[in-house]
Image: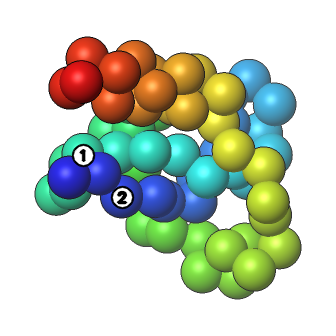
Amino acid sequence: MYEMHVGLAAPDGVFVWHVAAMGTATALCGQSLHEEHLEERERTDRHCTPCMSSFQELMNARR
C-alpha cells in the first residue's frame, strides 16, 4: 500500500504531494519525508512528478 504526504519538492522548495510506501520516511522520488506540514495540505494541489511516474510504473507492473 502507498500513501500521500505533503513535503517540499527538490529543487523548487515548493510544497507538493509525494507518494510513499506505508510506514516509510522516504518518498518514491527519494525525498526524505519529515514531519508533515498540515497547513500546507489544504493549500497545495501540486503533485511530485517523479513520485507519480514511479507510482504509475509500480501499478503497471502489478497488471
Sequence-first disc among 1 and 2:
2
Q: Which residue is mark 2?
A: 3
Task: State the residue at coordinates (59%, 72%).
Answer: 37
Tags 1 and 2 touching, CB below 8 Å: yes
Q: Which residue is mark 1?
A: 21
Q: Is residue 38 above or below residue 5?
A: below
Q: Measuring from the top left, give residue 50's x and y in whole percent.
A: 58, 22
Task: State the residue at coordinates (20%, 26%).
Answer: 62
Image side of residue 9 versus residue 13, left or right: left
Amino acid carrying mark 2 in the image: Glu
Image side of residue 4 versus residue 1, left or right: right
Is residue 34 or residue 2 the one in the foreground?
A: 2
Assign a secondary structure to mark 2: strand
Kindly tell me whether residue 25 is visible in this rendering: no
The quadrant of the rendering that contains the C terminus is top left
Q: Measuring from the top left, give residue 30's x and y in whole percent.
A: 40, 25
Amino acid carrying mark 1 in the image: Ala
Please tell me in which quadrant of the rendered image residue 6 appears: bottom right
Is residue 63 or residue 11 the one in the foreground?
A: 63
